[in-house]
């Protein structure tokens, strides 16, 4: 066998193999590679978009939390103000009630003192009338008179 013919046969076989590979194998292989590259690019783009969406969602959550904290602080301040208002109202009501009770007690004390004075006046007038009766019934004598006055003084 001639090496040139063998070499020529091998070259032709190699050329047919290259043509067959380029015509039938290479395009689907390149299409699969391009599809894979496209899917990877889309996945990276989706990952970037997801990162952006996550960052936006995190910002929105932070804003909502700030708003909720502000609202909670306002509610707490309102509650403190209302509690202080209720305490002040209760103090004022207690003071008014104490003043009313004090006025009632003073009025009752004054009425009791007036009743006691009236009772005392009645008793003194009865004693005076009784003493005068006794003096008029007896003779007027200085010693007896002095003894009756001492008796009256002791009774008062």
Image (cartoon, helix red, strand yellow):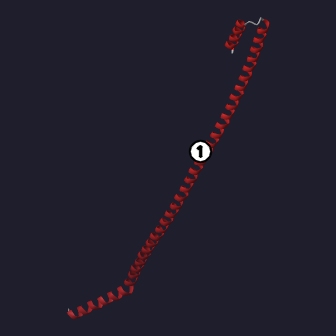
Q: Is residue 141 above or below residue 14?
A: above
Tag 1's secondary structure? helix
Number of numbered discs on residues = 1
Image quadrant assignment for residue 21: bottom left
* Horizontal and vertical percent position of residue 112: 70, 25
* Horizontal and vertical percent position of residue 30: 39, 82
Left or right of residue 142, residue 82 in this image: left
Q: Between residue 98 and residue 51, name the one nearer to us.
A: 98
* Horizontal and vertical percent position of residue 89: 63, 45
Q: Residues within 10 Å of mark 1 (few under 14, many from 20)?
A: few
Image quadrant assignment for residue 152: top right
Q: Can you say which quadrant of the picture contains the C terminus?
A: top right
Q: Between residue 76 and residue 91, name the one nearer to us.
A: 91
* Residue at screen point 24% across, 93% down: 5
Image quadrant assignment for residue 125: top right
Extreme-front residue of the structure: 142
Q: Is residue 93 above or below residue 38?
A: above
Left or right of residue 83, residue 135 in this image: right
Q: Between residue 25 and residue 153, name the one nearer to us.
A: 153
Q: Is residue 50 above or below residue 76?
A: below
* Horizontal and vertical percent position of residue 97: 66, 38
Q: Can you say which quadrant of the picture contains the N terminus?
A: bottom left
Q: Between residue 61 and residue 76, name the one nearer to us.
A: 76
* Residue at screen point 65% across, 34% down: 102
Left or right of residue 120, residue 82 in this image: left
Dot 1 corresponds to which residue?
A: 87
């Amino acid at each position: 066998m001639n090496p040139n013919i063998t070499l020529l046969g091998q070259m032709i076989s190699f050329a047919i193999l290259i043509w067959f590979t380029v015509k039938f194998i290479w395009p689907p292989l390149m299409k699969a590679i391009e599809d894979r590259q496209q899917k990877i690019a889309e996945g990276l783009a989706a990952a970037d978009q997801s990162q952006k969406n996550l960052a936006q969602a995190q910002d929105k959550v932070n804003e909502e939390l700030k708003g909720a904290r502000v609202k909670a602080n306002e509610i707490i301040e309102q509650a403190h103000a209302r509690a202080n208002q209720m305490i002040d109202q209760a103090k004022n009501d207690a003071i008014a009630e104490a003043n009313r009770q004090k006025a009632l007690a003073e009025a009752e004390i004054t009425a009791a003192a007036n009743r006691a004075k009236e009772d005392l006046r009645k008793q003194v007038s009865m004693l005076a009338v009784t003493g005068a009766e006794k003096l008029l019934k007896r003779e007027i004598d200085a010693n007896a008179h002095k003894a009756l006055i001492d008796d009256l003084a002791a009774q008062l």
